[in-house]
Amino acid sequence: MTLGYIDYLIMALYFVFVLGIGWKLKRKVSTSEDFLTSGRSVPVWITSLAFVATNLGAQEMIGMCASGAKYGMMTSHFYWVGAIPAMLFVGVFMMPFYYGSRARSVPEYLKLRFDEKTRTFNAVSFAVMTVFSSGISMYALGLLFELALGWSFTASVLVSAAIVLVYTYLGGLTSAIYNEVLQFFLIVLGSAPLAILAVNKAGGWEGMAARLPEVMTRSWKYSGSAAANPMGIEIFGLVMGLGFVLSFGYWCTNFLVVQRALAANSMLAARNTPLVAAFPKMFIPFIVIVPGIAAIALMEMGTGYSLPVKGDSFNYDLALTTLMAQFYPSGLLGVGLTALMASFMSGMAGNVTAFNTVWTYDIYQGHIRKGAPDAHYLWVGRMTTVVGVGLSIGAAYLATLYNNIMDLLQLVFGFVNAPLFATFLLGMFWKRSTGHGAFTGLLAGTGAAALTHGLTLAEGKGAWLANLHEFPSTMAQNFWIAIFAWTACFLVTILVSLLSRPKPVAELQNLVYGVTAIPREEGARWYERPRTLAIVIGIICILLNVWFW
Amino acid sequence: MDDLRVTSGMFFSLLGLILCGMGILAPGTRAPLTEANVNLYTGIAMLVFGGVMLWLARRRA
């Protein structure tokens, strides 16, 4: 695919706007909290769209389209099961404690609720993880542009990283959040035409369903047993592993997303952030997954479209860009590629700003230099932006050299993340749980995750201790690793908490259910009430599940 | 630029103008699998979106 002048003009216009937003917001930054937490000043429509956008990185766009082509409509489970319920839970039940505690980060909440060691364990693992995940998505983007457009890997990595660096350095979290909203609009308006054009060409949804095996256009019908569907997952692992443990672990405890809600200008706005975000989130499958399914239907029709081959199967990761090349003429093609770049930047800026805050407040202020004047922490925050982007670029190059190291790291991050939700659930809703309990629970959960991986085999992976069980797919293995990790963490936290001395109740105010005044909703108009919103979203989400059953 | 509605309104209006311009000046531009003048149609959609954003900003101000 080749680009014309007009496509480059569109890309340039986008660059001017994102940098302009950073430049304009520069004067709003005068304290470290302005820079790292937006000074809790952002209106809800902005925080909620940023909440969706920061999760809608390039890897998500490319990966979900690929998964649509490979597995079909079952991929929607990652949204309607693996995101929406957790987003409703965090908004209605957990945000009062996060926002009400006035913690500046998720690890800081753990420090207030439990103790220093639990906070540090979470802060360090999170900081390392964000750097590597932004490096990995940078690597994915560089590789894609190299393959699709023939751009140099180094050039696309450095240019996109430099732009993110400039606008986050200038305006901090506010600038990242404002840009995420612009990027969100661009991602939607730049990808929706592709979904419409591809589905139309494939004869509409009915036409696609007629041409493809039924498993490709149904979300639940084949989820009953692992043998019936290409994902190799069964309903219990799906609902408990993905729908409960992994999804709640991500949406309710990952600072990357929670940070957007904490930037909101009131308790009500913070609670509504994940709820308002759930509206667009529910419909994203239609612009990322459905085009992938249409790609397979188009191949069946003999339209001349075909997915590139890699080894003995298709290279599904190229589904999105090859579809753009077939459906987008010069002009719209520029918009589509700029949208892809925007999704990359929103994901990366999310990682960078979350890394910044955790490093500056939880690691630097917590351990390296306490009690310095605020101007010092503002300076550290700015420098951390530069260092964080630099480390991400390093991680991207590491990924080009040692693919296996990246796989291993992602596996280890999975072990550390899997038990997290048990810790937060007990911390927020059981005042008897203690710091020793939380810390040993996290270690036990991480250990149980590693042990499950060591004792089971899936697609040739795992079983480095012994082979006790074989899973039909690595996805099923991941779901079950999560289930075991969560259970171990939950039980060990309870046991050790009962054996250790509890925190005095006076110190738990605004941190735990039962000793916190639950914010009242009476003052808000009916459509602003978290519970009302959650019920409406829940009903729409159930209808979507039924419709595509 | 403080008001994000103005910023995104301006961005999408400009984007819409570029795409509409492309659709009017080069109406024959097609990708291998498209039959319609998609630049023009998407351009109009973006102009409408940008216009609505600017209108919302004005109404508030």
Image (tube, rainbow, N blue to C red):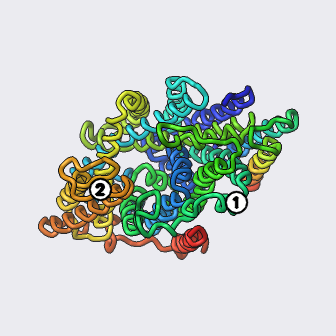
Label tally: 2
In this view, the residue in front, A418 or A521, is: A418
- x and y percentages locating residue A363 in the rendered image: 29, 41
In this view, the residue in front, A35 or A398, is: A398
Q: Is residue A107 above or below residue A248?
A: above
Callout 1: few (<14), some (14-19), or many (20+) C-alpha neighbours within 10 Å? some
- x and y percentages locating residue A291 in the rendered image: 63, 51
Q: Quadrant of the C terminus of chain A?
A: bottom right
Q: Is residue A526 above or below residue A276?
A: below
Is residue A271 visible in the rendered image? The answer is: no
A356 relative position to A419: left or right: right
- x and y percentages locating residue A376 in the rendered image: 36, 34
Q: Is residue A404 above or below residue A153?
A: below
A292 relative position to A263: left or right: right
Q: Residue at x 48, y 74 (%)?
A: A520
Residue on which the image places disc 1: A207
| The image quarter in which residue A333 lies | top right
Q: CA distance from mark 2 to mark 1?
A: 52 Å
A191 relative position to A393: left or right: right
Please, which chain is the residue tagged with disc 2 on? Answer: A
| The image quarter in which residue A510 lies | bottom left
Q: Is residue A278 above or below residue B42?
A: below
Residue on which the image places disc 2: A110
Query: Nearer the N terminus, badge 2 or badge 1?
Result: 2
Q: Amino acid at mark 1?
A: Gly
Please, which chain is the residue tagged with disc 1 on? Answer: A
Callout 2: few (<14), some (14-19), or many (20+) C-alpha neighbours within 10 Å? many
